[in-house]
């Protein structure tokens, strides 16, 4: 199994109901991100899923543009992110402590 297949497999486990176009974007991000290059497929998939949701499906970037600091913006989108993870069938959720890192 090559890296793409391993990441795709991890995304399917972490978000089994993710829509196809978002599945492809998350996979491509996990593969193309320099910071995730050495991460395990599971870690790369999870970080890509959460980054995709945060930046594409919440008001996170707008909150930053309005002057909120990163921690505050993450706090305000936490429930929205977990709602999307639930819709996508993810067995995991983001905890407030996770967002502070």
Image (spheres, rainbow, N blue to C red):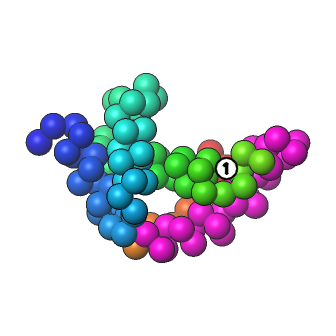
Q: Residues within 10 Å of mark 1 (few under 14, many from 20)?
A: few
- Where residue 97 appears, x then y in whole percent? 63, 57
**Secondary structure of residue under mark 1:** loop
User: Looking at the image, is 3 positioned above or below residue 88?
Assistant: above
Q: Quadrant of the N terminus?
A: top left
Magenta highlight on residue 78: yes
How many numbered dots are placed on residues in this image? Answer: 1
On screen, residue 81 versus residue 36, left or right, reads right
* Residue carrying label 1: 100
Which residue is depicted at the point 40% across and 73% down? 89
Examine the rendering and report whether any part of residue 97 can be seen: no
Residue stretch rendered in magenta on the structure: 63-88
- Where residue 85 appears, x then y in whole percent? 49, 67
Magenta stretch: helix, strand or loop mostly: helix
- Where residue 69 appears, x then y in whole percent? 81, 43
On screen, residue 90 versus residue 5, left or right, reads right
């Amino acid at each position: 199994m090559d890296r793409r297949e391993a990441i795709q497999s991890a995304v399917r486990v972490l978000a089994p109901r993710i829509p196809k176009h978002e599945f492809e974007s998350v996979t491509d991000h996990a593969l193309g991100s320099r910071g995730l290059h050495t991460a395990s497929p599971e870690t790369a998939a999870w970080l890509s899923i959460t980054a995709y949701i945060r930046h594409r499906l919440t008001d996170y970037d707008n909150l930053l543009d309005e002057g909120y600091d990163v921690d505050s913006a993450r706090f305000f989108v936490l429930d929205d992110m977990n709602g999307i993870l639930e819709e996508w069938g993810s067995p995991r959720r983001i905890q407030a402590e996770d967002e502070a890192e």
